[in-house]
Amino acid sequence: MPDQEWYSLDISKSLHFQKNLQLFRESQPELALAVESSIEGLCEYQFSKLEEGQYICRNEARNEIFYEPVNFRSNLQSKLDRILNYYQRELELAIIAGTGLGYLASHTEDAIRGNLARGILLLENRPELIAAQFTLFDCQTLIESEQVFWAIGDCMTSALENCFNKHRLDLIPFDRIGPIQERWFSDQERLAMQQTGAWIAGNWKKTNERIKQLEIKYNTCIKKPCTLDGGCIWGFATPQAYAHTPLIRTFMQGFEDLGWTKKLLEMKDSFATRYCVVENLFETCPDLFFICNTASSTFSCLSEDINRPRITWILDHPRYFSSVQMQDYLFSKDFVFYIDRMFGAELENNNAAVCQFMPATASFTKKGVPHNKYAAPILFVGSYQDTIQVMNNTTSKNREEINAMMEYLIQNPTKTGRDAITSLCITDETQKLLLRKALLYTDSIKNRLKDDERRIDYLLYSISNSKKRERVVRQLLDLGLVLYGPKSWINLTGEKYASQYRGWLDSDDLADAYASADLVLNIHSLQCPTCLNPRDFDVLAAGGCLVCDWVDDLDQGIITQGEDCFTTRRIDDLPALVKKLLNDPEKREEVRRRGHQTYLDRHTPKHRAQEVVDIIKAKFK
């Protein structure tokens, strides 16, 4: 091919290699070692650039050409179409054999991102080609994806075994797996890949036989009457859910305090997780199921005819965090409890046995111990998104309308983004801009909303919520407010208040931090516009002195203003209240003591668990 200019790769000049390799070390240390060990072998390969982002490679000494330049684009496109056709036929795992420079992997990941019912397994027996991929391309998205799995190295069976054991890919039904070949294979490689396929089939057969036996045992057990006096409760949580998982743990602890046996499965939310959940359910066969933020029917073994009650606890607004219309997936064995009364409108006309409001509880059960390192006049722990990013590449008219929508939602927290767009007569140009930014934003955080209107709603909720927090925080920095949370807070504090940002606070340290501060601030989220949220109860449980913006629940007798906490009707009045309280330590200590006692008397996880058990006993048939 005389018209092609071939050259060797120089890793030292790559803009991407070191970052890619470091990310790979963090997620795949053994495979990263295989890639590093193969770097010297790259000298045997030559590369040629077809156009921006498209390279072909060869091993001239062995007369091997891995990508044909004459039909490079059409060949890859036809293979990508075949993979996507797999998914349309309800196959779940695409195996890309000879992933080479990762063209199919990157395009496929982009097409299925956020849909955890779809996965990709990448096989590459030549790790030096992965090194080449890391040299040529930014692979961060691919490496960090929860849906992409790697098996790399000469000993493919060993690499596959490690991958299958770690990610439980053996639980994926064999008839839902589809293979595809990306690059050219030698005869020897082709034979090795056939043997790899045989290994996968054999491994799946053994697992399938075991799961069938578990299912038979489960189906026998589940037909027996359940025990609602100290039986077994099963739940599921993802450790990466910083706010929710501790709350789920304490709720389950509440049942244990009532004499129940608790089984909480904690695992990363990624492809194949649902199969691991089903396997664990088969093994546990509980009397009571506990599911958070989704309908029980999302687990295939919890069909309508399974005669066991299941608790569905809604902690987040279904409009923003539910991937399905939940009311269509709730059955007569579901007992639905939501922490904000506003959520009820999203859950109307369902078939659940119970669907009702229940206050939150705390995400830990211990009282905090004051420490000097956490001492602060006023403390806030929470997330924050810098809205400047959303304003990039916008006109003055766009910015004016987006700011108006944020202000509208802050002042009218029970309204949606669509309400803001309609009420403010937002232009088509800004609406189109919002949709583009919403698509990028929800994809980046792996939010699974597919509806464009809800995507826009979610973006507007997120930036408005941060704008509300920004407004309160700016007003309190001069009073000594200390911040814990993501690094995005640094953009707000600037150099003047830099020492008041303390970084990320581990959930295990929250109780001590709350107990150490003179005042603990809670700025209620716009997605829970009327309720006392878990942070309120966390502060009371820790023995902290709570000051917060007003929500409807403060008028419902759940806790008492001025006795258990402090609040103002207008968020702009918070600075004056805080200044007054900082000069009144006796009042702070009185409210700190009363608030903690109110929590112990009425709002512990045990109280919530007992309330749920009483309702289930009265309603379950």
Image: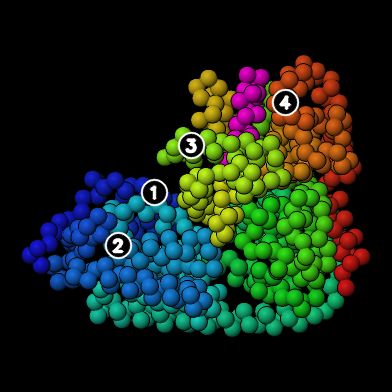
Asked which quadrant contains residue 219, the reply is bottom right
Q: Main secondary structure of the magenta part?
A: helix
Work out whether residue 334 or residue 594 is closer to the camera in this orientation and state it.
334
Q: Which mark is residue 454?
A: none
Q: Which residues are magenta?
A: 463-481
**Disc 4 versus disc 1: nearer the observer:** 4
Q: Are marks 2 and 3 in contact (CB under 8 Å)?
A: no
Q: Secondary structure at mark 4?
A: helix
Q: Are marks 4 and 1 in contact (CB under 8 Å)?
A: no
Query: Between disc 2 and disc 3, whose residue precedes?
Result: 2
Q: Amino acid at mark 1?
A: Gln
Mark 3 surroundings: few (<14), some (14-19) or many (≥20) residues within 10 A = few
Q: Position of residue 454 (x, y in %)?
A: 60, 54
In the figure, 159 relative to 414: above or below?
below
Query: Between disc 3 and disc 4, whose residue precedes?
Result: 3
Q: Amino acid at mark 3?
A: Lys
Mark 2 surroundings: few (<14), some (14-19) or many (≥20) residues within 10 A = many
Mark 2 — residue? 101
C-alpha span from label 4 to label 1:
45 Å
Q: Amino acid at mark 4?
A: Leu
Q: Are marks 3 and 1 in contact (CB under 8 Å)?
A: no
Mark 4 surroundings: few (<14), some (14-19) or many (≥20) residues within 10 A = many
In the figure, 245 relative to 537: above or below?
below
Please name the residue shown 52% across and 44% down the image. Answer: 427
Q: Secondary structure at mark 1?
A: helix
Mark 3 — residue? 397
Query: Between disc 3 and disc 1, whose residue precedes?
Result: 1
Mark 4 — residue? 574
Mark 1 — residue? 22
